[in-house]
Image (tube, rainbow, N blue to C red):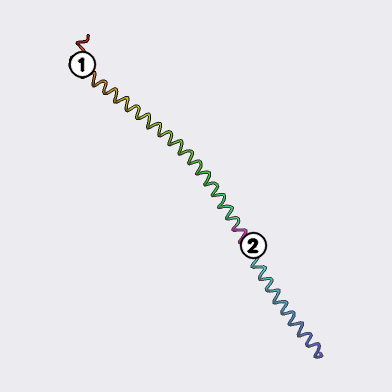
Amino acid sequence: MSEKEKLMASNNDSEYSKLDEVQDQVDRVKGVMRNNIKAVLERGEDLDNIDEKANDLADSADGFHQTSKKVKSHMCWKYVKANILLALLIIIILTVIIVIAVCASGECSKKK
């Protein structure tokens, strides 16, 4: 081989090695990008799951709020009814006591 052919072969080898090196870098970058894309897609799925759970929680909170308002109203009416019954009971007891006191003093027999 002539000197010229040796130089050309040497240049071709160095060009090929540079080309191989660049190709390796491109392959590594492609691999990293694939991993990044996969991670972004997984993160997107996780965000969708979190969003679904948040919506479900909001719906549950609305249901709880409505139920608690109904229970509060029911308990308020129950309290009012109990107070009315207590007042009536006190009035009846006082009436009985007054009637007994009046009759015991002899006022009942005088009116007849």
Q: Is residue 15 left or right of residue 52?
A: right
Please state the extent of the stretch shown in magenta in the rendering: 38-43
Q: The residue under label 2 is which amino acid type?
A: Ile
**First-in-chain label (2 vs 1):** 2
Of the pair 47 and 110, the residue shown nearer to us: 110
Of the pair 14 and 99, the residue shown nearer to us: 99
Callout 2: SS: helix
Image quadrant containing the N terminus? bottom right
Residue 13 horizontal/vertical position (percent): 75, 82
Residue 75 horizontal/vertical position (percent): 40, 34
Q: Is residue 93 left or right of residue 49?
A: left
Query: Which residue is painted at 44% across and 36% down in the image?
Result: 71
Q: The residue under label 1 is which amino acid type?
A: Cys
Q: Main secondary structure of the magenta part?
A: helix
Q: How far apart in space, not on screen, are marks 2 and 1 (Cα)?
A: 98 Å
- State the mark number for residue 103: 1
Quarter-of-image position of residue 18 = bottom right
Q: Indicate whether residue 92 is drawn in magenta.
A: no
Quarter-of-image position of residue 34 = bottom right
Task: Residue lying at the far top in this picture: please name it.
Answer: 112
Q: Is residue 76 left or right of residue 21?
A: left
Residue 44 horizontal/vertical position (percent): 60, 56
Query: Which residue is painted at 79% across and 85% down in the image?
Result: 8
Quarter-of-image position of residue 17 = bottom right
Q: Is residue 35 above or below residue 5?
A: above
Q: Is residue 7 above or below residue 99?
A: below
Query: Which residue is painted at 54% across and 49% down in the image?
Result: 54
Callout 1: SS: helix
**Circle 1 crowding by C-alpha within 10 Å: few under 14, some 14–19, many from 20:** few
- State the mark number for residue 37: 2
